[in-house]
Amino acid sequence: QVQLVESGGGLVQAGGSLRLSCAASGSIFSIASMGWYRQALGKQRELVATITSGGNTNYADSVKGRFTISRDIAKNTVNLQMNTLKPEDTALYYCNALIVTRSLYRMDVWGNGTLVTVSS
């Protein structure tokens, strides 16, 4: 079994910063990519940022230049540094990972989400 646990959400004023972390645990052979998605109230879930095992990153246009995704392969963790936060960044943020288990099954795993609230 594999699970993702997020941490670091909270309430922050506009212009402030938060750092989200996500740790993968369980029967992991390798992780192809990890990333962050978010879902605001009444909206669909959307990509925020992803990072591959090779370090290639992809960002939503709305967060480019403000958010930075990083990954510690040895620790199976991914972080999202969020700067210059805006009220429109308010959402439930989900960690995602494409994992190959020790039994060589490929799994698309999601965390339970961590809430980020940005006040104006």
Image (cartoon, grey):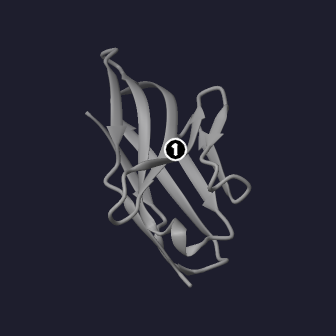
In the rendered structure, the answer to whether residue 66 lies left or right of residue 74 reads: right
Q: Position of residue 66 (x, y in %)?
A: 70, 60
What residue lies at 36% left-to-right and 52% top-to-bottom?
A: 44
Q: Nearer the viewer, residue 42 or 57?
A: 42
Query: Number of numbered discs present?
Result: 1
| Residue kind at label 1, given as amino acid type | Thr
Q: Looking at the image, is 58 positioned above or below residue 11? A: above
In the rendered image, the quadrant that contains the N terminus is top left
What residue lies at 44% left-to-right and 55% top-to-bottom?
A: 38
Q: Position of residue 56 (x, y in %)?
A: 67, 31
Is residue 76 visible from the viewing direction of this image?
no
Quarter of the image for residue 71 reads: top right
Q: Looking at the image, is 108 positioned above or below residue 92? A: above
What residue lies at 74% left-to-right and 55% top-to-bottom?
A: 65
Q: Residue furthest top?
A: 104
In the rendered image, the quadrant that contains the C terminus is bottom right
In the rendered structure, the answer to whether residue 81 lies left or right of residue 88 reads: right
In the rendered structure, the answer to whether residue 55 lies left or right of residue 33 reads: right
Q: Looking at the image, is 103 positioned above or below residue 54? A: above
Q: How dense is the environment of label 1, judged by Cα within 10 Å: few (below 14), some, or many (20 and up)? A: some
Is residue 106 visible from the viewing direction of this image?
yes
Q: Residue furthest right?
A: 65
Q: Nearer the viewer, residue 39 or 11?
A: 39
Q: Which residue is mark 1?
A: 77
In the rendered structure, the answer to whether residue 34 lies left or right of residue 105 reads: right
Q: Position of residue 61 (x, y in %)?
A: 64, 49
What residue lies at 68% left-to-right and 70% top-to-bottom?
A: 84
Which type of secondary structure does the marked residue at label 1 adopt?
A: strand
